[in-house]
Image: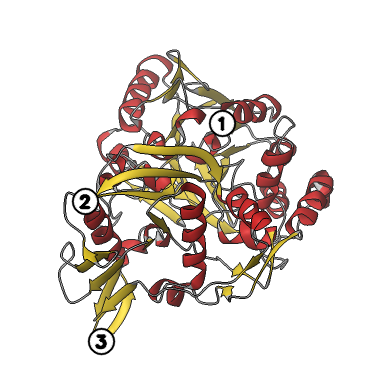
Amino acid sequence: MKRIRILATSDVHGTILPTQYSNGLSVHIGLARLKTLIDSLRDDHTLLVDNGDAIQGSPLTRHHYHFHADEINPMTKAMKEMHYDFIGLGNHDFNYGQKALQIHLTHVESPCLCANVKKENVPIGLSYAIKEIDGIQLAFFSLVTSYTPTWESQEHIEGLEFIDAYESAKKIVEYLKKFEQPDYIICLYHGGFERDLSNGSLLEEDRGENQGYRILKEIPGIDVMISGHQHRSLSGKLFNTVYTQTSDKGKELALIDIYPENHHIESHILPNDMLADEKMIQLVEKEEKETQTWLDTVVGHSKVDLTISDTFQARLKKAPLVTFINRIQQETTGAQLSSSSIYDGAVGFQNKITMRDIVSTYIYDNTLVVKKITGAQLKDYLEQCASYWTLKGNNIEVSQNFIYPKKMHYNYDMVEGIDYTIDLRKPIGERITQLIYHGKDVQKDNEFTIALNNYRAAGGGNFDMLKEAPIIQNNGIDFADLVSSYLEKHPEIDFVPEDNIHLVK
């Protein structure tokens, strides 16, 4: 039986080599391993596509951006070697600005599809493309989550218009059905599913970040949706549309087989368990060597234990690392308050602090912002953070809302400069029972300056109370530069950690 195959990657996040940068261990991730798997599955009836979030997310691409921004990204080289038929864009592909993105798109030598981002009313990628295999026409179009401007630095997306993904999908599908009449319509959507795929219940506040469920339910005619963004491992069929979603960093590959003779479509998620392609490794050998040298650079020392061995405990008891980062942000900006979080996989800092410690602890290229907030906004902010915890019997656990459908531990912030109590016995929204600044209860109309990352400052994580607050400073310093610059001035760290967050159960 005639078969057409689509192989799809998504959310690779600059991961090429099968190496865990925090400890050097070999793991089943990256394009070098994926290439071996893809080559074993590819034939003349196979198409390879990528669904975005490609050029940002690893120490390799971070080093490139900071030291060789005008040159071709190593991820671009790797993707060129893969010979993608089409590539889409993800929200993180805008993290390094439009110039870096354009260098990538110019040199990757694969057509870029992007229907819902426009500049001067012109899509920055093709609205759609038709591929014919053995007389079968397949129409591809791509969408990026229209929530991107909420998180991204405005200088990186200046002049760009992000159009609602659902509305864009509706128009394109209607156009394709009326004028192109392809045999199959394939949607690359760098967004996920806002509802439970089994029962349709809402999994998150419906703000437009993820619209996959609505698109499939209300827009007939999409045969395949290759989704992303949530880093979930999904494969199935919903409302007559076959869907896939892979995890991040090249851990998995999506495979879709189309059988035109009986109109049957199958989808599978394959683990990345092949040996790495040697040519791919050699392709980025120079950049990787430079990156490893940079990562091993000692930038300071600490007399305080700033390591993270258990991220749950580090959040529960506010690890000294959090105090350290918040103090850096306060001293750098002069802000009265500061907030930071701990990401999954964070290792913290050894006695000898290296760049490897820094970039392994804070994986995103967020920048530092100072905002002015009221006492009322501060309390609302802390109440939302407090919803991270739940009680199960007498045990404190993480709320499922921060685990499923996507792990969002980065949305639990710990704020320095105030003392506050979280009473987990009380309902969500009423848990902050004490809020004290310099020995006095915080009043609703009090005003504070607070240092935080640009993602949170823009309301990322559904923190609308912060989005509305005015910006006082926006110096564009990212975390790695922030910490390394601080350590240049303070090469030896010594302080007494403060226990300013009190959990009551």
Which percent across, then down, holds residue 50? 57, 39
Q: Amino acid at mark 3?
A: Asn
| Image point (47%, 49%), residue name | 266
Which percent across, then down, holds residue 343? 49, 62
Give the image quarter of residue 421.
bottom left
Where is mark 1, residue-wise? 97
For label 2, the SS is loop
Where is mark 3, residue-wise? 394
Q: Amino acid at mark 2?
A: Asn
| Image point (22%, 55%), residue name | 380
| Image point (56%, 51%), residue name | 479
Q: What whole-number distance in Å separates the C-alpha atoms at marks 1 and 3?
A: 48 Å
Is residue 273 something one can see in this rendering?
A: no
Q: Which mark is residue 446?
A: 2
Q: Amino acid at mark 1?
A: Gly
The first of marks 1 and 3 along the sequence is 1
Q: Which is more foreground, mark 2 or mark 3? A: 2
Q: Which is more foreground, mark 1 or mark 2? A: 2
For label 3, the SS is loop
Q: Quadrant of the N terminus?
A: top right
Q: Residue furthest front?
A: 439
Is residue 94 something one can see in this rendering?
A: yes
437 on left or right of 91: left
For label 1, the SS is loop
Q: How dense is the environment of label 3, judged by Cα within 10 Å: few (below 14), some, or many (20 and up)?
A: few
Give the image quarter of residue 469.
top left
**Whether residue 55 is situated above or below residue 176 in the rendered picture:** below
Give the image quarter of residue 399.
bottom left
The first of marks 1 and 2 along the sequence is 1
Q: What whole-number distance in Å separates the C-alpha atoms at marks 1 and 2?
A: 37 Å
Q: Nearer the viewer, residue 236 or 505?
A: 505
